[in-house]
Image (tube, helix red, strand yellow):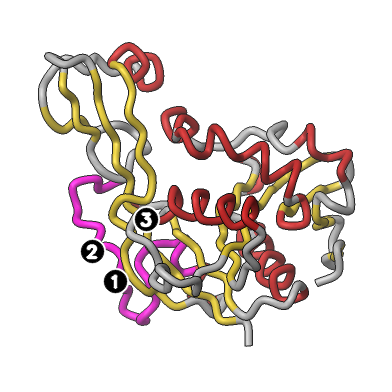
């Protein structure tokens, strides 16, 4: 795509490279991310660098003066020696590979989705699909032939005990994925490839977990946390808890 595209309505999707004045407003909109997800250490450390160093891979949707959606992606070298396969560490590993490649001047060959977020009041309007399409178009316009995505399935939190391996390939009678966000990807041309069983890891002391969730975190073992895709493992005697989030890899060929 060009750096800006217009839909027939008032929505305007642009890269941050074209509209750098929007950088400070990316987090203005109210979204539904669970608090604990925002404490993944790699995301905490490197999100700001996407904005400052790779703004051409950040998409922002505005409606008039209102920011209504954002999308982050990262270019990286998937087919570099020693890689090749989509990583089990998913989201976290893409951050490490992408910024290592950037530091060492390694030419990227693939773009990974990092986040697509729609403002709470705009959910259900098809805007997530528009942002995914814009991300695909943006990658294609920059010469890439594939976008990959470590997808956070948006209905999995309702059944945290279910195996991600079963959930990833569950379908409806019409053959489309059971999960709504996975359906958006498949309808856009994506193919479910594999599971990323350890896509994000958040470890913290129990006081942090209590603050983030409002739960006591006083018993040993799995704790069901609202918004989590799998139980959080609690070690009260040792004073910490760990959440390992599974995602689902989807490949989007662009040719």
Of all residues shown, which one is farthest toward the front?
104
Q: Position of residue 110 (x, y in %)?
A: 58, 70
Foreground: disc 1 or disc 2 = 2
Residue closest to the far bottom:
255
- Residue 87, given in percent of the width and then of the height, sits at 37, 62
Q: In the rendered structure, are the residues bearing label 1 and label 2 in contact, judged by CB atoms less than 8 Å apart? A: yes
* Disc 2 target residue: 165
**Looking at the picture, does residue 74 appear above or below residue 110?**
above
- Is label 2 in a helix, a strand or a loop? helix
Q: Which element type, helix, strand or loop, lies under badge 1? A: loop
| Residue 158 percent across, percent down from the top left | 30, 46
Q: Which mark is residue 222?
A: none
Q: Is residue 132 left or right of residue 182?
A: right
| Magenta range | 158-183
Where residue 111 sits, quadrant-wise, is bottom right
Q: Is residue 31 left or right of residue 156?
A: right
Residue at coordinates 42% horizontally, 68% vertically from top-left? 83
Disc 3 marks which residue? 247
Query: Closest to the observer: 130 or 206?
Result: 206
Q: CA distance from mark 2 to mark 3?
A: 10 Å
Residue at position x 63%, y 88% in the image: 255
For marks 3 and 1, the one nearer the N-term is 1
Q: How many marks?
A: 3
> Would you call the spot at circle 3 few (<14 residues within 10 Å), some (14-19), or many (20 or more)?
many
Query: In the figure, residue 207 lies in which quadrant?
Result: top left
Above or below — where is 168 with respect to 104? below
């Amino acid at each position: 795509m060009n750096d800006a595209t217009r839909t027939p309505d008032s929505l305007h999707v642009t890269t941050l490279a074209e509209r750098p004045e929007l950088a400070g407003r990316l987090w203005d909109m109210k979204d539904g991310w669970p608090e604990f997800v925002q404490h993944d250490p790699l995301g905490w450390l490197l999100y700001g660098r996407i904005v400052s160093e790779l703004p051409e891979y950040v998409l922002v949707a505005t409606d008039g003066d209102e920011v209504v959606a954002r999308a982050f992606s990262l270019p990286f070298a998937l087919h570099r020696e020693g890689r090749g396969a989509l990583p089990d560490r998913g989201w976290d590993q893409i951050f490490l590979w992408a910024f290592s490649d950037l530091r060492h001047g390694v030419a990227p060959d693939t773009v990974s989705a990092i986040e697509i977020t729609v403002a709470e009041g705009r959910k259900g309007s098809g805007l997530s699909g528009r942002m995914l399409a814009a991300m695909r178009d943006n990658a294609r316009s920059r010469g890439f032939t594939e976008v990959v995505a470590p997808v956070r399935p948006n209905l999995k939190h309702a059944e945290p005990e279910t195996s991600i391996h079963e959930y990833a390939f569950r379908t409806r009678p019409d053959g489309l994925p059971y999960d709504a966000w996975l359906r958006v990807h498949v309808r856009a041309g994506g193919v479910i490839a594999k599971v990323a069983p350890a896509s994000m890891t958040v470890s913290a002391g129990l006081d942090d977990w209590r603050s983030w969730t409002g739960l006591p975190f006083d018993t040993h073992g799995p704790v069901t946390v609202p918004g989590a895709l799998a139980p959080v493992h609690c070690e009260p005697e040792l004073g910490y808890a760990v959440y390992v989030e599974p995602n689902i890899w989807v490949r989007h060929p662009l040719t």
